[in-house]
Image (cartoon, rainbow, N blue to C red):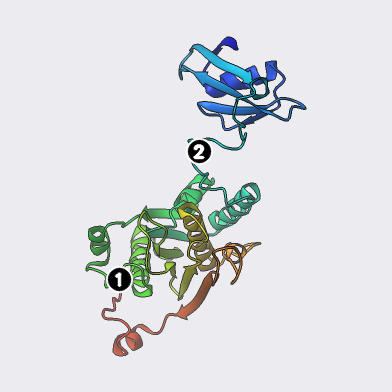
């Protein structure tokens, strides 16, 4: 049993120098209980650190011992922790490359002349942070709103939607976003209204599909993206990540930006892939050009036409 003392800001700053001092190579799970490996040793060793403070203070690391010294000690798995919670990003093994692709795509979007208003509900929330975290976001984002509750959605649309996650609701949201963008910019400015409404993994299992509808509304056309996710193949974080890629791709397409890599297609799960991916993901993309305003009114496609 060895008792060691040191001055530290946190457990991380205390344990790492301690491991280096004792020639310990590998550090797993820097938490209240941490597992390490001795060079050349086959048995795992355990380091338990206690009474550490976040400010400048004295910290004491106790209970440093090799499990091989005690014949009755249970075998310790260095990759297991009794309070371990799965990393929500654990399914993304290529996070570094993925982040680079997304950052490059957002920079191209920011370089385009279009300005956008985004209304996001039920998911795709990472698209907001991604757009705002890359330099030049003011060149793209006019306004972002998250009408999450039923009352908030009703206030945005002017009435209660028949179904929150539907193509009709997403179209109305995108149109409202477009009108808002027009009102926030001078005449002649290229603007885009983006809307996303999603039904993803929740605390209660959903009987229906996990899906997302994204609509991009411009002065010339409406772009519609309907994504049905392979149920049970992703956790909440990764479903939100996937739907966020749809929002970014829709914004790029509406802004007439050609991306080196399609953000949606590279993440789709093909049918029959994985343990739970029985049907895989399905994606339907539709481009609908605007018809003449009077024709749309006479055909019943529009209920109100505004001339200015």
Question: Relative to residue 216, is residue 137 depicted above or below?
Answer: above
Alpha-carbon distance for marks 1 and 2?
38 Å
Q: Where is residue 66 drawn, in percent x and y?
A: 65, 21
Could you say which is closer to the camera, residue 308 or residue 230?
230
Residue 163 is marked as 1
Left or right, 213 with reference to 135? left
Residue 78 x/y as whole percent:
62, 34
Quarter of the image containing the C terminus?
bottom left
Numbered label attached to residue 195: none
Question: Residue 69 is drawn in which quadrant?
Answer: top right
Residue at 49% over, 51% down? 131
* Residue annotated with mark 2: 84
Q: Residue furthest right?
A: 40
Decide which of tag 1 and tag 2 comes sooner along the chain. Answer: 2
Residue at the (46%, 73%) spot, across then down: 224
Front residue of 69 and 16: 69
Residue closer to the observer: 250 or 177: 250
Please state, as top left, top right, bottom left or bottom right, where the N terminus lies in the image. top right
Dot 2 crowding, Cα within 10 Å, few <14, some 14–19, many 20+: few
Q: Name the residue at 46% across, 80% down.
A: 289
Could you say whether the residue bearing mark 1 is in a helix, strand or loop? loop
Percent across and percent down for residue 100 are 63, 50
Q: SS for tag 2?
A: loop
Label 1 CA crowd tier, 10 Å (few <14, some 14–19, many 20+) = few
153 to the left or right of 75: left
């Amino acid at each position: 049993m060895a008792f060691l003392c040191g001055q530290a800001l946190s457990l991380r700053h205390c344990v790492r120098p301690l491991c280096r001092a004792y020639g310990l190579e590998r550090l797993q799970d820097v938490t209240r209980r941490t597992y390490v490996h001795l060079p050349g040793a086959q048995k795992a060793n355990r380091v338990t650190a206690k009474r550490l403070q976040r400010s400048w203070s004295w910290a004491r690391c106790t209970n440093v011992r090799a499990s091989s010294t005690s014949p009755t000690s249970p075998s310790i798995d260095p990759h297991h922790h009794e309070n371990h919670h799965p990393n929500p990003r654990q399914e993304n093994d290529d996070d570094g490359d993925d982040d680079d692709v997304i950052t490059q795509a957002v920079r191209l979007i920011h370089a385009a002349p279009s300005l956008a208003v985004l209304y996001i509900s039920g998911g795709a929330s990472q698209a907001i942070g991604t757009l705002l975290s890359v330099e030049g976001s003011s060149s793209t984002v006019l306004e972002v709103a998250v009408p999450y509750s039923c009352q908030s959605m009703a206030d945005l649309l002017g009435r209660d939607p028949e179904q929150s996650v539907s193509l009709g609701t997403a179209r109305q949201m995108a149109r409202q976003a477009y009108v808002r963008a027009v009102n926030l910019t001078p005449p002649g400015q290229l603007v885009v209204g983006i809307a996303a409404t999603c039904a993803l993994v929740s605390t209660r299992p959903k009987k229906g599909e996990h899906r997302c509808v994204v609509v991009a509304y411009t002065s010339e056309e409406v772009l519609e993206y309907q994504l049905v996710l392979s149920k049970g193949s992703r956790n909440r974080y990764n479903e939100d990540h996937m739907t966020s890629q749809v929002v970014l791709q829709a914004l790029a397409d509406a802004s007439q930006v050609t991306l080196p890599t399609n953000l949606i297609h590279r993440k789709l799960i093909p049918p029959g892939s994985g343990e739970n991916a029985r049907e895989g993901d399905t994606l339907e993309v539709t481009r609908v050009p605007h018809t003449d305003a009077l024709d749309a009114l006479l055909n019943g496609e529009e209920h109100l036409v505004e001339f200015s």
